[in-house]
Structure formats: structure tokens, C-alpha cells
Image: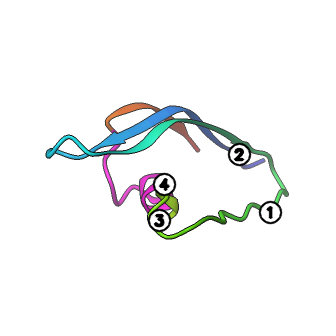
Amino acid sequence: MAVVKLKKVEKTYPNGFKAVHGTDLDIKDGEFMVFVGPSGCAKSTTLRMIAGLEDITSGDIII
């Protein structure tokens, strides 16, 4: 069984810009998830954090 959980995940860059603000997400086994939103709303940053390509500032990602 595979799950992905984000608990209060935040990303703040060294220049002080806060890209991700306390995101909570539960993706259960067998679910299909889509991130949709305007340019610049941190969709790619969130996916990069889940993939381990981007460090998180605070919170937990559980896979």
C-alpha cells in the first residue's frame, strides 16, 4: 500500500520569499491527484519537494 502525506509543508527561499504556505495533503493508495492553478502558485515547487529535488523549510513529507 502506497500513500503520500504532506503535513504543514512550507518552502521559504533564502531571499525570504515564501512559496509554499503550510500545505496539508493526503493521497491514498490508488488515488489519482492533479495539481491545477495559475502560473507561480507553487505547483512545481510542491512536486519537486515530494520528489526530493527541493528541500523543505518546515513540515513533513511521508511516502
- Whether pointer 3 and pointer 4 mark residues with C-beta atoms closer than 8 Å, the reply is yes
Residue located beneath label 2 in the image: 3
Q: Does the magenta stretch include residue 53?
A: yes
Marks 1 and 2, how far apart at CA: 11 Å
Q: Who comes first in sequence, dot 1 or dot 2?
A: 2
Numbered disc 2: secondary structure: loop
Residue located beneath label 1 in the image: 32
* Image vertical order of residue 43 relative to residue 15, above or below: below
Q: Position of residue 42 (x, y in %)?
A: 46, 57
In the rendered structure, find residue 46 and report the number of the disc placed on it: 4
Q: Is the magenta stretch mostly helix, strand or loop?
A: helix
* Span highlighted in magenta in the image: 44-56
Count residues near mark 1 (Cα–Cα under 10 Å), then give few for <14, some for 14-19, many for 20+: few
Residue 53 image-quadrant placement: bottom left
Residue located beneath label 3 in the image: 44
Marks 2 and 3, how far apart at CA: 20 Å
Marks 2 and 4, how far apart at CA: 16 Å
Marks 1 and 4, how far apart at CA: 16 Å
